[in-house]
Amino acid sequence: MHIHKLAIQNFRLLEDVELIVEPTTTVIVGRNNSGKTSLTEVFRRLLSSDASPTFRLEDFSLSAHDKFWKASVLKAQDKEDDEIRAVLPVIEVRLTVQYAKNAASVGPLSDFIIDLNPACSEAVVVIRYQLRDGCIDALFEDLTYDANGQLAEQRIKLFRKLKERLPHLYTAAVFAIDPNDDTNRKDLDFRSLRRLLQGSFINAQRGLDDVTHKDRDVLGKVLEALLSAAVSESANPDDQAVAEKLAEAVEGIQAGINDGFNKQLDVLLPAFTLFGYPGLSDPGLLTETALDVKRLMSDHTQVHYAGLNGVNLPEAYNGLGVRNLVFILLKLLEFYKSFMATPESPGLQLVFIEEPEVHLHPQMQEVFISKLASLPAVFMSKFDPATTWPVQFVVTTHSSHVANRADFECTRYFMTSSDESVGTVRHAVIKDLRQGLSGTNPDDRDFLHKYMTLTRCDLLFADKAVLIEGPTERILFPKMIAKVEAANPDEPKLSSQYVSVVEVGGAYAHLFFDLLTFLELKTLIITDLDTVKPGDNNRLVACRVSEGTRTSNACLKTWFDKADITPDELIGKTAVERTKDNRFLAYELPQSTGHPCGRSFEDAFMLANPELFSLQDGDAAERESKAWEAANAIETKTDFALQYAIQETEWVVPGYIAEGLRWLSQGTRHTTAEPVEAAATGAAEAAAAPEEAETASA
């Protein structure tokens, strides 16, 4: 049995979202402020205590404010309570739990199974924070403004009152719903929910900060929780035995303290006899020092690391990364032990781990996420092979190392979108990479996953993206952005936006199209014309653009869906034709009408800067030939890029790249109706054709 799906409404950024949960590990990725923390927080509210969860007005999604206003207008119009209640927003969490139809027992889930369909293997649990029955009058009491008024001060008055009243008039309810019939429901209580589901949390802020003057014995605190689990009557016998030995050791120390330490301590007591105390019938005062094993573990036990010459190193002396990893592993062991020691263990445990990458180096991050799913089996085999730990992990991360090492199938992408009907109010959108890439060729999907893992690609966290061909463009890219911004001071600054630059090459850029569309990521693709012509034995060979009969670039052929597209056709394509699905395609174009065109970034860069490369003289054909020969004579393209990125920085950006950068700087994730006009000046392109002047395949 496991949680299969979560649906959340009206909690902060989670206005109306649905999330498929993996049976083992689900990885949550996305930009900052995209709703990841909201997901953890709503379950913290529901599962962290035995009391009924409470929320505040600030916890409701901003879009819910309009519903409160509409409900108040209906109340002012003396509408029926049922009509008003139907408009009032609620915070709702809906869990879909899957179980085996042939299971001998479903344990605490049985309370939530209310359908009569023998083929059904799902149960639906709903937690709803809603207005109490009969409280509509109290919620809108004293609000006597004009029912049709829309003045700002009236709305402010309403929400000021709601902020005070909502925590007292709203309450949380738990009930089960028939998966086959929403009208069939069964009211339950939070004890039933917590018998079914236990939530555990490892926060992003774990108190591991390295301090100089005060040790932060965070790891020692975890030992207390492990001891608490060990002394439970339902704990593992081996753990109980360890706890008993600890108690015996403390009793031995206690006896020594009573015989020696307390006798000396009695001497420090005030001389009460000077004041006639004790009297004949009054008892005397004695000291007794009591040792509490739990207090010893939490307040006086520190985790040290082995040193030399009997000098061990305090916890804070070790690296933060090691402490973070040890802390997470100890907490997971604590969760396991506590779960198993509970007299009536819940049917499921949901463990949220926020930002496990904190202080961990990249390789350790990757190992952690790859091994996390196997940890329950390790614990069970070591401590209690006969009992299953029904745990599901939900990991939120900002690390490309963690995100890319996890499988696409277990990755959920959080992004935000704005509802234009209510202004700029943002809400979270959750995308499932398993579903989003389901139509992609399996080999291409496997390539994407391997590529993103090997290159530490951060597409999942970027605001915008640029796909380039090689290291030349990557090295010159920051300089190109700076030059385009200097030439267009009144336009948005791309340098102030989070742009992921991915080096993919013209042969692979098209494999990213489905992923980029799914992520709704505004993307500039900079590639090469890669013109070719028939050579000996009709083998296609690289050539100047003016001689080319077609292109060998797979990205260009895929974009225009034409395998034999000619250079003239490519040069004639408009900016509109080079814009598709939130992507813009940039490749070499003449700087202006009648000018020669480069085949790759290097000769296009030279043609855009004729004075720099002595290309001022001659007609277009001569200048094209000189640039072609000079580009082919470059021995190391990286050295070429470094020369113009560091030493000789007075140059202009090729027009096709400047056009693309200006397009990318505009807006957010969605393209405008028309791309920006091509710029007359620009910077250099991101593409170094892999075949250089060698034989190119069709």
Image (cartoon, grey):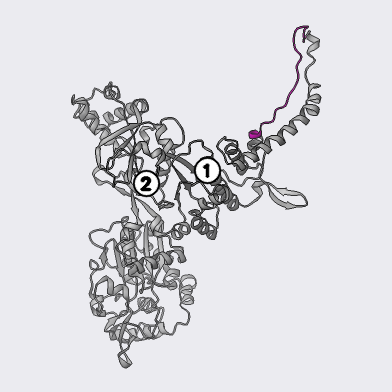
Q: Is residue 180 above or below residue 165?
A: below
At horizontal 48% and vertical 42% (from top left) the residue drawn is 200
Report if residue 647 lies within the magenta region: no
Residue 548: image quadrant is bottom left
Q: CA distance from mark 1 to mark 2?
A: 23 Å
Tag count? 2
Report if residue 284 lies within the magenta region: yes
Quadrant including the C terminus: bottom left
At horizontal 48% and vertical 36% (from top left) the residue drawn is 344
Residue bearing mark 1:
335
Furthest residue to the bottom? 536
**Viewer-proximal residue, 292 or 488?**
292
Residue bearing mark 2:
99
Which three-letter amino acid code belongs to the residue tagged 2?
Tyr
**Comes first in the chain, label 1 or label 2:** 2
Q: Please tell me how crowded label 2 is: few (under 14), some (14-19), or many (20+) other residues with Cα within 10 Å.
A: some
Q: Is residue 490 left or right of residue 374?
A: left
Residue 323, percent from left and from top = 60, 49
Q: Is residue 68 above or below residue 501?
A: above
The part of the chain drawn in magenta is: 277-295
Residue 45, percent from left and from top = 42, 36
**Viewer-proximal residue, 611 or 425?**
425
Residue 652, percent from left and from top = 38, 71
Residues at marks 1 and 2 touching, judged by CB atoms closer than 8 Å:
no
At horizontal 33% and vertical 85% (from top left) the residue drawn is 543
Q: Which labelled disc corresponds to residue 496? A: none
**Viewer-proximal residue, 157 or 203?**
203
Q: Is residue 408 above or below residue 612?
A: above
Which three-letter amino acid code belongs to the residue tagged 1?
Phe
Element assignment for label 1: helix
Q: Is residue 669 left or right of residue 637?
A: left
**In this rendering, the label closer to the viewer, 1 or 2:** 2
